[in-house]
């Protein structure tokens, strides 16, 4: 049996990030952790492109355009959907996740989804660093895995 090894070398990769501005403190924390991890894995800062959007529902459209551009090896979605008093939380959480998955499957481009969905701002702040860094690792690993499979 051939076992494809995990490869977290990001040297030479071009990464696109779509980041929500809603819940700005959490989103900035996600971005800082993601960017630091990308750089630690060898991704050149000049090869990272950030597109800022108003909220999580706008992320899939920007990802779709980034994927269609052919300029990126992988994409990353960063955002925070924090539960409020209305049903709107479920709509935004479900539809943003569906949209990100749809873009990934339609384009064949790896997309790491780090749109947090939490009950409280505190939960989001506790998770932002870990999930931001994790998204960077997921993106890099998936680019290398798909190359190895091809």
Image (cartoon, rainbow, N blue to C red):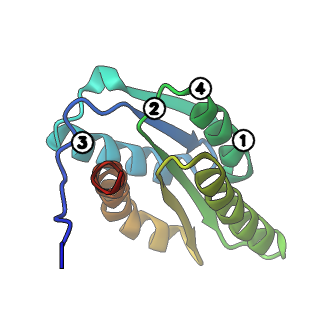
SS label for mark 1? helix
Camera-nearest residue between 18 and 75: 75
Which residue: 36% across, 30% down?
A: 14
Q: Which residue is mark 4?
A: 69
Q: Between disc 3 and disc 2, whose residue precedes?
A: 3
Q: CA distance from mark 2 to mark 4?
A: 8 Å
SS label for mark 3? helix
- The percent position of residue 25, horizontal first and vertical second, equals 48, 49
Q: Which residue is mark 1?
A: 61
- The percent position of residue 81, horizontal first and vertical second, equals 63, 63
Report the disc number at residue 134: none
Q: CA distance from mark 3 to mark 2?
A: 18 Å
Q: Nearer the viewer, mark 4 or mark 1?
A: 4
Q: Image check: 112 left or right of 141? A: right
Q: Which residue is mark 3?
A: 36
Q: Which residue is mark 2?
A: 72
Which residue: 39% across, 60% down?
A: 128
- The percent position of residue 146, horizontal first and vertical second, equals 36, 53
Judge whether 48 appears above or below 63 on screen.
above
Callout 4–callout 3 Cβ contact below 8 Å: no
Could you say which quadrant of the image residue 93 lies in? Answer: bottom right
Could you say which quadrant of the image residue 52 lies in? Answer: top right
Q: Between disc 2 and disc 1, whose residue precedes?
A: 1
- The percent position of residue 53, horizontal first and vertical second, equals 65, 37
> Callout 3: few (<14), some (14-19), or many (20+) C-alpha neighbours within 10 Å?
some
Q: CA distance from mark 4 to mark 3?
A: 25 Å
Q: Residue furthest top?
A: 46
């Amino acid at each position: 049996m051939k076992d494809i090894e995990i490869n977290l070398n990001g040297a030479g990769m071009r990464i696109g990030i779509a980041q929500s501005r809603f819940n700005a403190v959490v989103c900035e924390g996600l971005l800082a952790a993601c960017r630091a991890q990308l750089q630690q894995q060898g991704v050149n800062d000049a090869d990272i492109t950030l597109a800022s959007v108003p909220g999580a529902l706008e992320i899939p459209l920007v990802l779709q355009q980034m994927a269609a551009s052919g300029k990126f090896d992988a994409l990353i979605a960063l955002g925070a959907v924090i539960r409020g008093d209305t049903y709107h939380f479920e709509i935004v959480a479900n539809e943003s996740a569906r949209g990100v998955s749809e873009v990934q499957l339609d384009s064949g481009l790896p997309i790491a989804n780090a749109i947090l969905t939490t009950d409280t701002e505190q939960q989001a702040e506790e998770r932002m660093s870990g999930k931001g860094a994790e998204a960077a690792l997921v993106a890099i690993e998936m680019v290398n895995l798909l190359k190895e499979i091809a």
